[in-house]
Image (cartoon, helix red, strand yellow):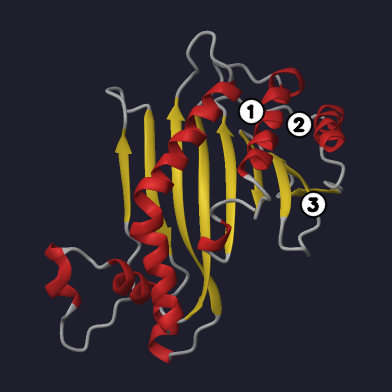
Amino acid sequence: MTPYASLADDFYVNMNLATEMELPAQRETILQYFERVQKRFPSMRKFYCRDKRDYVLEEDKDQGRYRWAAVETKRLCSGQVNPPSLDAVLDQHRLVLDLAPAFLSVSPLDCEALDVLFGFDFAFRGNHNALLAEALGVGPALERFGDLPGGRVINYEPSLTVALDEECRIQVRISTETRTNAFQVRTGEFNEEQLSVYVTARQYGSLEPDTSYVDAMDRLARLARDVVDNCVIDQILKPLARTIALK
């Protein structure tokens, strides 16, 4: 298991490569690409098309742990939910990016953005926004606003993006996503939904000369992991888990 498996109900690592030009959509090209992915991971047997142009290959989801890969109009994606190890999921991303130049004609020039996302989902039945405010706080500047008489928090999704180079091409973002709406808060009727915490490391623009997509992805993965380890586990994930446990 990954060192993050016990921190949330579900943990996943996704890779997304957004391209400037459209990716090939010919039947033979798409099938050959996914056949090579499947050759490495034979359990990825479910292939389908969604939205007329997005092609997906994935494992069976019934076990709660699965791989998936997708080719969209201008995006190449790969992910694994509840991976057995970080090496396992990063090897999958490396394969997808390693195949892309030969099978999908993806050039290092043809990069709008490349990102690696570490995601953590918490199952919770209740007001996600109020839960986040209680677990993480809202900061001194907003404390009085949150304490208005009769007030109930209906929208609170803190996020922060930081650029790590002078050109702002390398960025890392910590963000949250709630799935509670005002109707649920008003009626008090909540479904058990996923409250998500994301750490995304992203690089914009074409790659540097002599840099491969695999090299760039590996650097982003190290950056995302450093942020999770040093800025997210103790500061966000553990407080959220403790607060949920008390409800």
Q: In the displayed image of the protein, which residue is found farthest to the top?
A: 209
Q: CA distance from mark 1 to mark 2?
A: 9 Å
Residue type pointed to by label 1: Glu
Identify the secondary structure beneath mark 3: loop
Residue type pointed to by label 2: Ala
Residue shown at 52% from the left, 39% from the top: 116
Judge left or right: residue 172 versus residue 22: left
Judge left or right: residue 244 versus residue 98: left
Q: Nearer the viewer, mark 3 or mark 2?
A: 3
Residue type pointed to by label 3: Glu
Identify the secondary structure beneath mark 2: loop
Q: CA distance from mark 3 to mark 2?
A: 22 Å
Q: Position of residue 104 (x, y in %)?
A: 72, 24
Q: For residue 157, which quarter of the picture?
A: bottom left
Q: Position of residue 197 (x, y in %)?
A: 45, 58
Q: CA distance from mark 1 to mark 3?
A: 26 Å
Give the residue pinned by disc 3. 59
Other-residue count near label 3 (Cα within 10 Å), few / some / many at <14 / 14–19 / ≥20: many
Q: Position of residue 79 (x, y in %)?
A: 65, 45
Vertical relation: 176 (above or below) 68: below
Q: Nearer the viewer, mark 1 or mark 3?
A: 3
Give the residue pinned by disc 2. 25
Of 39 and 50, the residue lying toward us: 39
Query: Which badge, 3 or 2, comes first in the chain's sequence?
Result: 2
Give the residue pinned by disc 1. 22
Q: Position of residue 14 (x, y in %)?
A: 59, 44
Query: Which badge, 1 or 3, comes first in the chain's sequence?
Result: 1
Residue shown at 38% from the left, 53% from the top: 232
Confirm or deny contact between disc 1 and disc 2 (CB under 8 A): yes
